[in-house]
Amino acid sequence: MSAIITNIARAPRVATAPLVPGRSVHLIDIENLCGESRPTRNQVEVARQRYMEVGLCQLGDHVIIASSRGNWMNSAYGWPGARYLVRDGKDGADLCLAEVMSTEGLTQRYARAVVASGDGGLAPFVSELAAKGMDTVVVSQSSRLSRLMRMAAHKCIVLTPELEDIA
C-alpha cells in the first residue's frame, strides 16, 4: 500500500527528448529506503518487493543502488541486477546518488528519475532534474521524507506501513 502526493506547484516542463523514451532511472539509497543503517539481506528484499509494488519500475529501466561499503553485499543479494555504488562516511550513499544526478546526463538518457530516499540533501539535485524538464518521483517512508524532498519532485509516493514495521 502507498499514498501518492502530487506537487501541483511543480508543473512538468518541456524537456529534450531522451534517447530512450519512457525509460526511467531509479536512484535508491538502500539504507534510507529500509530505514536501517545496517539493513539485512531480508530487509533489502522486503524493500525491493515493496518498491516494485508501487509499479514504477519497468523492464529496461536502470536501477542504481547506493550504500556504505559494509552494506554492499546485503544490497547485492537482496536486490540483484542493479548497478551498485558504495561510499563510506556521513551521507555516503547520498553523495553517490548526487554525483550520478549531477554528472551523468540523466535528462538526455531517461524520461523519468525515481529517487528512493527522503533525505533533504538530495532535494537540490532532484529539483535541478525537474527544472530541466525531467519527470521526477520520490519514493520514501513517511518518517524519512523531508519537506525539501517533497517539494523538489513532481510526485512523492509514501510507503505505508513503514518498512521497518514489516521486516
Image (cartoon, rainbow, N blue to C red):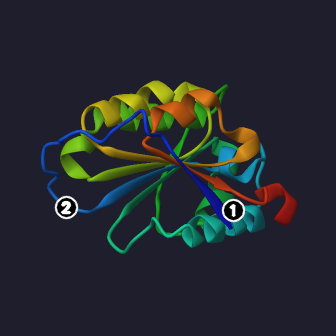
Label 1 residue SS: helix
- Report whether 98 appears left or right of 44: left
From the viewer's perspective, tell me whether residue 160 is left or right of residue 2.
right
The residue located at (33%, 38%) in the rendering is 11
Per the model, the C-alpha gap separating discs 1 and 2 is 29 Å
**x, y percentage for residue 124?**
45, 24
Q: Nearer the viewer, residue 5 or 16?
A: 5
**How many marks can you see?**
2
Which residue has dot 2 on it?
A: 21
Q: Residue at x 69, y 62 (%)?
A: 44
Q: Which mark is residue 44?
A: 1
Amino acid type at circle 2 is: Pro
Q: Nearer the viewer, residue 62 or 18?
A: 18
In this rendering, the answer to whether 70 lies above or below 91 is below
For the N terminus, the quadrant is: bottom right
Res 110 seen here: yes
Is residue 95 visible in the rendered structure shown here? no
What residue is at 76 percent from the left and 47 percent from the top? 35
Which residue is most to the right? 165
Q: Along the line of sight, which residue is nearer the eye, 86 or 61?
A: 61
What type is the residue that disc 1 sits on? Answer: Val
Q: Residues within 10 Å of mark 2 (few under 14, many from 20)?
A: few
Mark sitting on residue 80: none
